[in-house]
Image (spheres, rainbow, N blue to C red):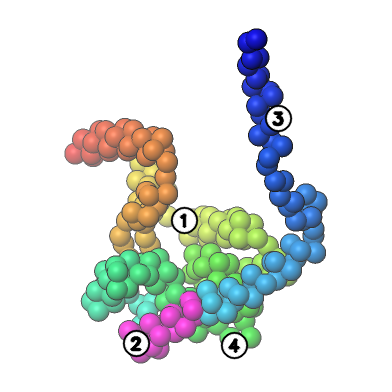
Amino acid sequence: MVERRSTVAERDASNNANVTLVALPRSAEKIDRELVERAVSHIRDVLAKTVTRGTDEVGAYLLQAFYDDDPALYFSASPNKHASLRLLIERCESMDFPVSRTFLANALRLAAVSKELPREATFRRLPSSHRVELLRLKVPENVERLASKALSGKLSVQKLRALIQNEVERSSADSDRGRKRTPPVLRVIEACLRAVRDEETGRLLFRRSDIDNMTEEQVARAQTALASLEKRVADLRRLLG
């Protein structure tokens, strides 16, 4: 008598019978809004004690050590022109100093901006993520005005960023009045430069870690786009003579 071969479905059913089902927490199957609120509160408190406090302490130290605690000295020239600070920045992202250049630059600028604002300024009550966005504004009064909007409206970083962009564009339009309009060629070149350059250090904005986080397909697309960009830059260079 020939033994009947078991079907795939029968084998799957047999295997499933031996599998112990794991019961997920109730919050995995049904939204628990109270849990989410507790998580938000807890994580926010942790970040306030670590990230925000760390950024403030590092910035205050840098301003004191490299600029004699004087924001005016900091704003008088680019940090890239400070020989000792530039050497410190070059040590960033090494084994003995695993700190990003962007973190260092933001911490220092936050300290300088904070010192020029009143002690009760709303800016000081914002999380570091929001305060970093406000660094794009050059006028302290504008910084405090948008900080108040962010706090009272409980704005996300994205919404605050949009407000800041509108402010920057409006300020730029006001300053351009009465002056000769910037030619499109120059405007595009300068915009491209701002997109890839760290404003504080003058170096490339991106790091090796940014590339490591990309997929192979994304790297290939980036390489193709970069090759095309290099050709257009060469064409533009020829036009400029």
Residue at 38% of width from left, 88% of height from top? 64
Residue at 65% of width from left, 60% of height from top? 156
Q: Which residue is mark 4?
A: 119
Is label 1 in a helix, a strand or a loop? helix
Q: Which residue is mark 1?
A: 176
- Mark toward the viewer: 1 or 4: 4
Q: Magenta span covers which residues?
A: 54-72
Label at residue 13? 3
Let me know if residue 151 is in the magenta part.
no
Looking at the image, is mark 2 or mark 4 earlier in the sequence?
2
Residue at 47% of width from left, 83% of height from top? 57
Mark 1 neighbour class, 10 Å CA radius: few under 14, some 14 to 19, many 20 or more:
few
* Visible residue check, residue 82: no
Looking at the image, is mark 3 or mark 1 earlier in the sequence?
3
Q: In screen coordinates, is 194 left or right of 174?
A: left
From the image, which quarter does the N terminus lie in?
A: top right
